[in-house]
Amino acid sequence: MKASLDVCYSLLGIDPECSEEELRLAYLEKVKEYHPDKNRSVRDANKFVSIQEAYKTALEHKRGQAFIEEEKRKEEQDFHNIKHTVPQHRRYLTYDGVGFGTPINRARQYKQVRVAQATEAVYEHRKLKYGHDEMSLVNADKAQARKIKISNLIDRVVDDLIRESMQRGDFDNLSGRGRPLDYSDHNPFIDFTTHNINKIMVNNGFKPEWIMLSKEIRDNIAMAREKLAVMREKLGPPPYPEEDQLRWEFHRNEFSKRVHEINEMINKYNFIVPFMEKQMVHYNIERNVDIILERHKDFLPKDKDGKPMKVDQLGPLPQVHADNVKIHWGEVWTNIKNVFTSR
């Protein structure tokens, strides 16, 4: 074996004590020299093959020596002198043996490890939870599909049984056979006479007073808002000149009177309505006026296309005379008094 190794090293032209890198470089030089592409002779080709075999043998020898040396080094490291070396099995009893350094540093490292473990546990829990939810949805879908199939099967079986019974004449002795079904909403807890009386009154257009009053309240407030919105559309946005201000004040006062009347109707409605949740609250005049000033187009009358009418479709501005304007006599006497006192 030693003779063959010496032959291999001599063939490569290198010392047996060389390193693995030096062996590789020597092999590359010999390969370039005896490569068949460079020298076409058969002798050179055989030499090239011999160099390859010699390199493989020498390389295995080198790696085997390195492995043996590594094993020896490990054996030397594994041998401990108890008198001078601390036993490797001895660990800290606190903080689960985590960390190194001073106790403060070990406590800080232990907290970091606990946080990392908690984060990992939360992640695993969520992963299992979502996986379980997905499987639950899949199982629920499968169960629903089976339920539909079963229900359809039952429906078909029942339908077949009904048809067979009809063909045998099992339904010929029913009391309502040959007559149309009664679709009237008769309440079995109400006397039959009372039910017929109510039915006659409904068929003749009679409605309870609180229902008619509720409709009248809604119609009146809608009409009052529409009139004030029309005036707002004709006058434009405030502030107004003196003449337009008189028109606005006049129509605003008319709106206030109408809302007062509607609130009186609401009082009457709340007394006669039989349900507490159907009761109404009073309309606030100032709030309604502010809403109409801001969103008057919502209350304008609609044309055929359902769009708010334009100014030219609403007609001209009405004339407001001084007789229609309310005179505040307190302000008049105050102004007269100021005139005489200034002299």
Image: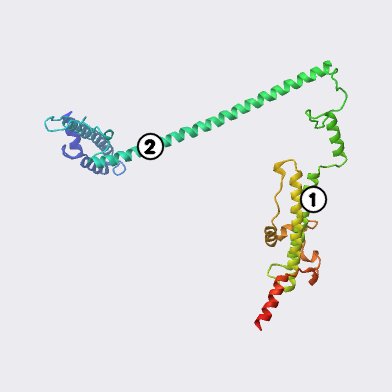
The residue indicated by pointer 2 is: 118
Question: Between residues 97 and 59, which one lies in front from this camera angle?
Answer: 97
Q: Which mark is residue 47?
A: none
Choose between 48 and 272: the one closer to the eye.
Answer: 272
Instruction: Give amino acid for label 1.
Output: Glu
Residue that appears at 42% across and 36% down: 122
| Mark in front: 2 vs 1 | 1
Instruction: Give the residue at x 83% y 15%.
Output: 168
Residue 89: x and y in percent read 21, 29
Label 1: which residue? 216
In front: 44, or 92? 92
Tag 2: amino acid: Ala
In the rendered image of this protein, does residue 124 appear above or below residue 263? Answer: above
SS at mark 2? helix
Q: Residues within 10 Å of mark 1 (few under 14, many from 20)?
A: some
Quarter of the figure that contains the C terminus: bottom right
Q: Is residue 233 above or below residue 111?
A: below
| Residue at disc 1, secondary structure | helix
